[in-house]
Image: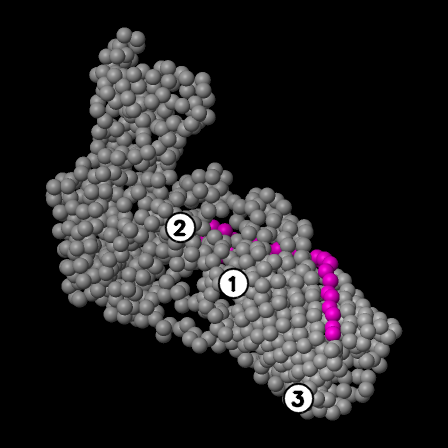
């Protein structure tokens, strides 16, 4: 009897210790680099490559740059060390750049206010030269031709607008080029995602020039230029659209350099602006009857402004340019359209009998190029805090509310005309990218196609349906791929981008790399108060 | 001593799901050893569970069977899309106690206490699938007063009400890994806990013995819906900004313990050999969705399950070697009620093949000791849960279950 107990105990122990075993346990041995050699991976590009998000580069954000995420997967199959520009000086993880206006701290959602705000604090990131070539050569703000421009990292060029503070931080010399520094890493594999800014700064500025704070005039009221046909980059304003011929030339030069040692790589196309929340979040017709102050206000606006304008535009053959405000449904904003027919003389003439010449002339100047926005217009994200606020340029407090009684300045709206220029340039760049890649037998990550899926919803490999929507509350947080600047992905978005590139690598180079799980990467940052 | 033993078992009461869904088929050492057949077997007081009608045929005036098992359950998870692995090792102690008393020639009364449902799974906290489940512990104890009536020589019926009492604890992360909903790196998670949930059901059966060698049995155990009301729902590691919405509250949820119908036959081939076959059909399709309704205005958490009815095919045999030793063996094939695309890691079970064995050592003509063992083999399975807004959860699962058990039988 006692023996039987012992046997039973042994039997029990034997079974209890038996482990469930997979026929093919996952190990890193399952993965392979295929025909690619990841021993020295170099990423060339702009803010999207640098890990820019929430309006800046900050330490924890940079850690989730897509090249850094890729490098972690490459490391499973022989990938070497991957270095990024040092952000050790970002001790409070705020981003921004110390002492340079316009380079503020990262955006967060202030839960107390329910809106995005720059995180309170002072940037500690300095321009102290690191003089180091890094594997991540993404330089925020860089356009295609900047990558081959000597002196783009020269601190002395900052005041002249010829240098970029981000490259100043790590350029190996005052005459170094981005591509030159990249080649110092002797890449065996590269990604090149450049060209977004060649058209994006035009788009995000609503097709206007940057304001020069050194002059009393507001240059942002003036249109930027589509430089198609002009290959002289030195003559470009910073918001101009780069000439596609220049772009193709520079791109060929970049690829020639990157492949000069036989490196393989992935190039990425430029996404169209309609797939980013910066342009898709603010509706063209946000003025609800309540927002306009109710029917009494609406009647007054119609009687004194919209009615007369509608009458004048209709008389000159544009009956749909301005319509009466509705007291029942949301109304479009009033905008300044640089391409509209100028009716200032006609408005002045029509209103002189009732308002007198000086007032009528002022009306003519303000509303001569005004029209109501349509569904074809894209209102930029920052406009949401401008619509309905007083415009300091207005001659009278009676007609000073942006978008309501005063036309929204051009920089807040990317009109259909301007979009056409952006789209034409984007298409031309992408054609150049695809054709240059084909010539050099390189893989293409078609980010234009991939990110355009976000418009209707992109089904990620983990099943989550991601959209191009801007953050709209905690319960949808896990669907948001874009950071709070509305242009750049958040860390989760970068993981989705890294996955798309991995899929391209796996396909094109017969590699087998694991994907990243987007769920493991943060989305929006929320603070209780700011 | 017996009282002490049963009290100890009560205290330990917990079970690990190893059959389809969260059904735990360990309701008697003798019958488990025979592949958990028993609807047409009259061996001991265990019949109070397997088929109350069988109690009428027990030879002794008084029968007692008490037993428990040590249930080891191990599950491994892996997937190579993202290159992750996870594991869950669990231990449970399903138990049962049956007593019958023959009041007269045609009427037998009994009491059955058993743990037919339960689930305990504990993945690593904050693992890859933490937004579906970190851990779950579901317990249910059924208490069933029973009568059996013999109608003539060949036929009997039996049955009784079931008083079910149970508890559930369930923890999951609110979202997939997320820097927003976390405090100091600990993701926001939700624990729901309900204790003392009770409900009523019934167990009825009939048995027909066309000859003295053959028994036919039919048993039906009703569905019991465990209605958790005003259980505690507590949010942990809630970031400051969300503390006004993610407030601790109470919850309501319904969990069905499905009805099961069993038909079977046993044949006494020789004096020593008995063979039995059971067919179980469990109405799992009652489990459509686990909906947790919060009482503080938070949206109801809807977790589709969409189980399907599932059957189990059981084969068992018993060899009575002599007055002291009886040996048993069995096999069953258990269909999983979980459908493709609904394979949630809280009950990560697929179809299984189970092998059982055991023996009884009869110390004297009143007192015997039963031993059983159970080994369940699960094929490796690739499946996913596709019904969570945080994303699909797909991978490969492999489970092993082993359970040695011991019991005593007393009768006079």
Real-space Cα distance between discs 3 and 1? 42 Å
What residue is pinned by disc 1? B339
Q: Are marks 3 and 2 in contact (CB under 8 Å)?
A: no
Is residue B286 visible from the viewing direction of this image?
yes
Disc 2 sits on a residue from what chain?
A
Residue ID at (18%, 43%): A242
Query: Is residue B402 something that shows in the picture?
Result: no
Q: Residue lying farthest right?
A: B104
The percent position of residue B83, horizontal first and vertical second, equals 41, 67
Q: Distance between the residues labelled 3 and 2?
A: 59 Å
In the picture of the structure, the residue carrying the numbered disc 2 is: A466
Q: Nearest the camera: B104 or A429? A: B104
Q: Residue under mark 1: which chain is it in?
A: B
Residue at the image point whose x is 73% and y is 87% from the top: B361
Mark 3 or mark 2, which has the lower sequence index? 3
Q: Is residue A93 left or right of residue B170?
A: left
Q: Position of residue A173 (x, y in %)?
A: 19, 55
Does the stretch in magenta take in B377? no
Badge 1 marks a residue whose secondary structure is loop
- Total numbered circles: 3
Asked whether, in this view, residue B184 is left or right of residue A332, the answer is right
Image mark for residue A228: none
Camera-near label (3 vs 2) is 2
C-alpha gap between disc 2 and disc 1: 26 Å
Labels 3 and 1 share a subunit: no
Q: Mark 3 lies on which chain?
A: A
In x, y percent, where is residue A299?
Answer: 41, 17
Question: Which mark is on residue A6?
Answer: 3
């Amino acid at each position: 009897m006692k023996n039987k107990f012992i046997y039973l105990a042994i039997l029990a122990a034997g079974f209890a210790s038996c482990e469930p075993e997979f026929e093919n346990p996952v190990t890193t041995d399952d993965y392979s680099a295929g025909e690619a050699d990841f021993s020295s991976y170099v990423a060339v590009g702009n803010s999207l490559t640098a890990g820019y998000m929430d309006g800046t580069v900050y330490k924890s954000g940079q850690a989730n740059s897509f090249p850094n995420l890729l490098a972690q997967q490459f490391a499973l199959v022989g990938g070497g060390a991957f270095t990024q520009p040092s952000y050790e000086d970002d001790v409070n993880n705020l981003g921004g750049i110390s002492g340079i206006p316009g380079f503020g701290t990262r955006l967060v959602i202030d839960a107390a206010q329910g809106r995005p705000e720059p995180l309170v604090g002072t940037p500690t990131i300095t321009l102290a030269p690191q003089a180091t070539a890094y594997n991540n050569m993404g330089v925020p703000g860089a356009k295609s031709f900047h990558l081959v421009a000597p002196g783009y990292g020269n601190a002395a060029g900052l005041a002249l607008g010829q240098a970029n503070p981000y490259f100043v931080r790590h350029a190996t010399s005052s005459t170094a080029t981005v591509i030159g520094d990249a080649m110092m890493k002797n890449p065996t594999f590269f990604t090149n995602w450049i060209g977004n800014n060649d058209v994006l700064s035009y788009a995000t500025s609503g097709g206007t020039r940057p304001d020069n704070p050194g002059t009393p005039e507001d240059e942002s009221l003036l249109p930027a230029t589509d430089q198609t046909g002009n290959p002289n980059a030195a003559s470009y304003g910073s918001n101009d659209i780069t000439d596609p011929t220049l772009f193709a030339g520079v791109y060929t030069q970049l690829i020639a350099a990157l492949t000069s040692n036989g490196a393989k790589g992935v190039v990425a196309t430029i996404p169209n602006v309609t797939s980013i929340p910066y342009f898709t979040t603010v509706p063209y017709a946000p003025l609800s009857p309540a927002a306009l102050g109710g029917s009494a206000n609406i009647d007054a606006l119609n009687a004194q402004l919209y009615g007369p304008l509608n009458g004048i535009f209709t008389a000159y053959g544009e009956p749909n340019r301005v319509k009466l405000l509705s007291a029942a449904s949301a109304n479009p904003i009033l905008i300044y359209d640089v391409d509209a027919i100028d009716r200032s003389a006609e408005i002045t003439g029509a209103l002189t009998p009732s308002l007198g010449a000086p007032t009528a002339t002022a009306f003519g100047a303000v509303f001569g190029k005004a029209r109501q926005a349509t569904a074809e217009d894209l209102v930029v994200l920052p406009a949401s805090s401008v619509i309905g606020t007083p415009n300091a340029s207005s001659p009278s407090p009676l007609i000073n509310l942006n978008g309501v009684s005063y036309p929204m300045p051009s920089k807040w709206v990317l009109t259909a005309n301007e979009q056409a220029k952006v789209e034409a340039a984007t298409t031309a760049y992408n054609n150049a990218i695809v054709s240059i890649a084909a010539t050099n037998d390189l893989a293409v990550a078609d980010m234009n196609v991939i990110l355009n899926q976000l418009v209707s919803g992109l089904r990620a490999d983990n099943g989550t349906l991601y959209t191009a929507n801007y953050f709209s509350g905690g319960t949808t947080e896990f669907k948001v791929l874009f950071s709070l600047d509305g242009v750049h992905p958040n860390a989760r978005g970068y993981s989705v981008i890294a996955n798309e590139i991995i899929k391209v690598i796996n396909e094109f180079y017969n590699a087998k790399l694991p994907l990243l799980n987007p769920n493991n990467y943060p989305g929006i940052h929320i603070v209780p108060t700011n | 001593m017996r009282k002490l033993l049963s009290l100890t078992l009560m205290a330990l009461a917990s079970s690990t799901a190893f059959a389809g869904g969260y059904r735990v088929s360990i309701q008697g050492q003798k019958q488990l050893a025979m592949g958990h057949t028993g609807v047409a077997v009259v061996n001991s007081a265990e019949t109070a569970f397997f088929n109350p009608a069988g109690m009428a045929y027990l030879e002794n005036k008084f029968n007692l069977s008490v037993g428990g098992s040590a249930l080891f359950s191990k599950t491994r998870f892996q997937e190579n899309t993202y290159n992750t692995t996870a594991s869950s090792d669990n231990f449970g102690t399903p138990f049962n106690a049956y007593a019958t008393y023959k009041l007269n020639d045609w009427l037998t009364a009994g009491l059955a206490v058993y743990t037919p449902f339960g689930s305990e799974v504990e993945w690593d906290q904050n693992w890859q699938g933490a937004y579906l489940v970190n851990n779950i512990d579901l317990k249910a104890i059924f208490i069933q007063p029973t009568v059996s009536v013999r109608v003539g020589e060949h036929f009997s019926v039996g049955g009784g009400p079931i008083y079910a009492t149970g508890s559930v604890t369930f923890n999951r992360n609110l979202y997939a890994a997320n820097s927003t909903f976390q405090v100091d790196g600990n993701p926001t998670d939700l624990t729901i806990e309900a204790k003392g949930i009770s409900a009523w059901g019934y167990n009825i059966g009939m048995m027909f013995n066309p000859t003295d060698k053959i028994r036919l049995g039919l048993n039906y155990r009703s569905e019991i819906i465990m209605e958790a009301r005003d259980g505690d729902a507590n949010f942990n590691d809630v970031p400051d900004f969300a503390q006004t919405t993610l407030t601790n509250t109470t919850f309501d949820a319904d969990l069905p313990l499905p009805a099961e119908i069993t038909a079977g036959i046993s044949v006494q081939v020789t004096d020593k050999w008995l063979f039995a076959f059971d067919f179980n059909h469990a109405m799992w399709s009652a489990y459509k969705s686990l909906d947790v309704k919060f009482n503080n205005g938070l949206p109801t958490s809807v977790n589709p399950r969409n189980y399907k009815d599932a059957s189990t095919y059981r084969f068992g045999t018993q060899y009575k070697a002599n007055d002291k030793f009886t040996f048993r063996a069995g096999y069953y094939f258990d269909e999983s009620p979980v459908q493709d695309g609904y394979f949630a890691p809280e009950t990560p079970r697929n179809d299984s093949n189970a092998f059982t064995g055991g023996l009884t050592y009869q110390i004297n003509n009143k007192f015997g000791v039963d031993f059983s063992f159970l080994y369940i083999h699960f094929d490796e399975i690739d499946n996913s849960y596709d019904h969570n807004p945080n994303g699909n959860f797909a991978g490969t699962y492999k489970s092993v279950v082993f359970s040695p058990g011991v019991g005593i039988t007393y009768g006079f």
